[in-house]
Image (cartoon, grey):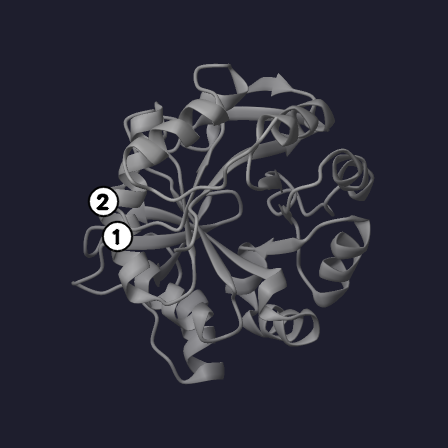
Amino acid sequence: MLTKRIIPCLDVTGGRVVKGTSFINLRDAGDPVELARFYDEQGADELVFLDITASSDNRETIIEVVEKVSEEVFIPLTVGGGVRSSHDVRKLLNAGADKVSMNSAAVLDPLAFIRAASAFGNQCMVIAIDARRYRYGTTTAPEEFSQNIKTKFDVDLAVSRNSGWEVYINGGRTPTGIDVLKWAQFMASSGAGEILLTSMDEDGQKNGFDIALTRSVSSTVTIPVIASGGAGNANHLVEAITEGNADAVLAASIFHYGECSIDYVKRLFMENGIATRVVVN
């Protein structure tokens, strides 16, 4: 039986870890290197490190910070934010990342992701999807996003009357008019080894994950899905796996602010029959 992973997320801007609500109202949560070291010692299964303003501000991910974090942790590290090309992926892997995630760049140019997956292997490439609930006819996105993909790949990914969620890019600032489930399927067949799925509606709300979103994506693809956005307590992490069928759960504020420990979540997993990596201190 495959173990389910617990993954703290380090959202970084300006060299500091931050946390907000629905991608805005950010507040400081600490030093990324110190937090990474702490989570490694506490038994986290992996870490995700995201430079959350890199894409929107057109900046490169801060390689120096990645290098420092990778020197302090001995568990898999996924890094994203401002990743646009195979060159960027190579720099992050050389800096110490085990996996690299793309979001905005993959929507703007799926070939950039496909080339990176071909060069470095599917196991290194994560597609990050920021999803917002969609009601038919409400998108404000220009048609160019889905139309460009349709022209290049002969596949229609546009939101429709049956769509439940829409893909957003640039740190959740830009709607794309692309259906989340269609996008997940397309990227799974284009070299993604894993999906980092974030609910923009639930992010920072602490009301629990969007179970319907997580379950829908998990049942649509055969690659692992990491549930993100909405964790307010340890039970929410359990629900993402038992009800949402996630392969891993990601959380930030409940860990950063000491509201919940990695050890407690692991014990709760085992009590609920969820296989998890046992850490012996």
Query: Where is residue 100 drawn, in percent x and y?
Result: 64, 55
Residue situated furthest top in the rendering: 258
Please tell me which residue is depicted at 77% across the width and 64% down the height of the picture: 87
Residue 26 visible to the viewer: no
Residue 145 visible to the viewer: yes
Query: Where is residue 8 drawn, in percent x and y?
Result: 53, 33
- Circle 1 crowding by C-alpha within 10 Å: few under 14, some 14–19, many from 20: some
Mark 1, residue position: 215
Which quadrant holds the N terminus?
Answer: bottom left
Residue 259 lies in quadrant: top left
Badge nearest the viewer, 2 or 1? 2
Please tell me which residue is depicted at 58% across the width and 25% down the height of the picture: 18
- Circle 2 crowding by C-alpha within 10 Å: few under 14, some 14–19, many from 20: some
Amino acid at pointer 1:
Arg
Q: Is residue 137 left or right of residue 85?
A: left
Please tell me which residue is depicted at 37% across the width and 80% down the height of the picture: 155
Residue situated furthest bottom in the rendering: 154
Amino acid at pointer 2:
Glu
Label 1: state its secondary structure: helix
Label 2: state its secondary structure: loop
Please tell me which residue is depicted at 38% across the width and 44% down the height of the picture: 275
Query: Where is residue 159 drawn, in percent x and y?
Result: 28, 63
Q: Is residue 273 left or right of residue 261?
A: left
Mark 2 or mark 1: whose residue is earlier in sequence: 1
Labelled pair 2, 1 in contact (Cβ < 8 Å): yes
Which quadrant holds the C terminus?
Answer: top right
Mark 2, residue position: 243
